[in-house]
Image (cartoon, rainbow, N blue to C red):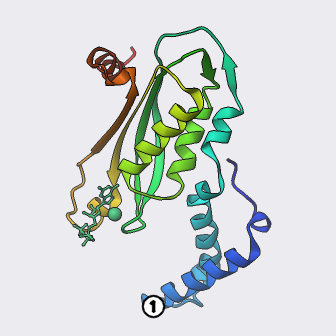
Amino acid sequence: MPYKKFEEYNIKVTEDIKDKYHSIIESIGEDIDREGLLKTPERASKAMQFLTSGYGMDAEEVLKSALFNEDYSEMVIVKDIELYSLCEHHILPFFGKAHIAYIPNGKIVGLSKLPRVVDIFSRRLQVQERLTDQIVNAINNVLRPQGVAVVIEASHMCMMMRGVQKQNSVTTTSAFRGTFKNNETRNEFLKLISAKLS
Ligand SMILES: Nc1nc2c(ncn2[C@@H]2O[C@H](COP(=O)(O)OP(=O)(O)OP(=O)(O)O)[C@@H](O)[C@H]2O)c(=O)[nH]1
Ligand SMILES: [Zn+2]
């Protein structure tokens, strides 16, 4: 999803968020008329709309737009998909990697659509657990594969910059459907995502 130009944002929403950032900047004791801050409410409004642009998008429609009939029935893995989301408790970023695998059942999906699904659900106010489930469910609903798995590893700014201030903790969440509930398949997936190609 490319960046929108300012004119492409809904004018009323942009103005509304801009006014609120204006108030926030004043409330923290900054000088809103200082040169460096003059356009900040507008920039922040656009940034916030981009970071939450997933609400306006339908992940299942995106997956349906690139489905192909194919007999391949081995594991397909797209790993190390970078991910940036906002925690719904503090509206601070959490970021990391998503790893997705599925075993087709007559249909494969265009590979780029998997990272697109990650973006659609990431660009919302989220918790990592729900994000993981939403990705796995969308793929499961549309592809009806033999199995699908999603693992997300992420660092949460709300635990790094504030709060407990732990810089190195990584949260891992996972969701498995179908044949990935079987130990052997799940272990193969986990082994492949942790393997380094050299
Ligand atoms: N389960 C889950 N918790 C999250 C996620 N992102 C942030 N949190 C947590 O949400 C919790 C909110 O707890 P509160 O006690 O209401 O908030 P707080 O007082 O700011 O808590 P501290 O961060 O401990 O200072 C915190 O423990 C955060 O670490 C997430 O994706 N999943
Ligand atoms: Zn948080």
Q: Which of 185 and 128 lies nearest the eye of the viewer?
A: 185
- Residue under the image location 64 percent in, 34 percent down: 63
Q: Where is residue 82 in the image (x, y as percent from the top left)?
A: 47, 40
Q: Name the residue under label 1.
A: 27
- The secondary element bearing badge 1 is classed as helix
Task: Tell whether 147 sits left or right of 35.
Answer: left
Q: Where is residue 107 in the image (x, y as percent from the top left)?
A: 62, 19
The part of the image, by quadrant, that contains residue 191 is top left
Task: Tell whether 118 sits left or right of 89.
Answer: right
Q: Position of residue 102 (x, y in %)?
A: 48, 23
Task: Tell whether 95 sits left or right of 21.
Answer: left
The part of the image, by quadrant, that contains residue 178 is top left
- Relative to 178, residue 97 above or below: below
- Residue under the image location 53 percent in, 17 percent down: 104
Determine the quadrant in which ligand 1 lies: bottom left
Q: In which quarter of the image is the C terminus?
A: top left
Can residue 191 be seen from the camera position used here? yes
- Residue under the image location 52 percent in, 22 percent down: 145
Can residue 193 be seen from the camera position used here? no
